[in-house]
Image (cartoon, rainbow, N blue to C red):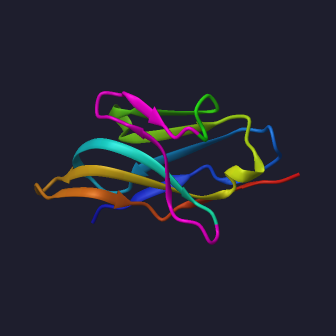
Amino acid sequence: QVQLVESGGGLVQPGGSLRLSCAPSGSIYKLYTMRWYRQAPGNERDLVATISTFGVPNYADSVKGRFTISRDNAKNTVFLQMNSLKPEDTAVYYCNADLVTDWGTPLTEYWGQGTQVTVSS
């Protein structure tokens, strides 16, 4: 069974930084596009950043210039470096990926459980 596991969330003051990580806990054949979403209480789940199989990133306007998405294909891991954090960045951050399992099953928009990020003075 494949599970995406996020880590790195926590409490940080405005202007601070956090680095989130996401990696599958089980064996997989291939990771393709990977994404970070976030969802604040009462809000929809919004796309924060995406990175293609070959490392091409895209960002939501709200985080552009502050967040950086990257990946380490050897470790099947995606990162989200979050700098200059603002209170409005407070949310549960979810990892999301397109992948193929070892037994050949394609999984698209496959979700992790989320990690809480709180930005507060």
Residue 56: within the magenta?
A: yes
Residue pictured at 64% horizontal, 32% vertical = 66
> What is the count of numbered marks?
0
Q: Residue furthest left?
A: 104
Residue 13: within the magenta?
A: no
Residue pictured at 75% horizontal, 45% vertical = 86
State whether residue 11 appears in this view. Answer: no
Residue pictured at 31% horizontal, 57% vertical = 109
Give the percent coordinates (x, y) of residue 11.
Answer: 76, 54
Q: Nearer the viewer, residue 27 or 77?
A: 77
Q: Quadrant of the N terminus?
A: bottom left
Residue pictured at 56% horizontal, 38% vertical = 61
Give the percent coordinates (x, y) of residue 20.
Answer: 57, 45
Q: On screen, 12 above or below 2?
A: above
- The span picked out in magenta is 41-61
Give the percent coordinates (x, y) of residue 31.
Answer: 27, 43
In screen coordinates, is 69 left or right of 98? Answer: right
Q: Nearer the viewer, residue 117 or 66?
A: 66
Q: On screen, 24 above or below 77?
A: below
State whether residue 102 appears in this view. Answer: yes
Q: Residue furthest bottom?
A: 42
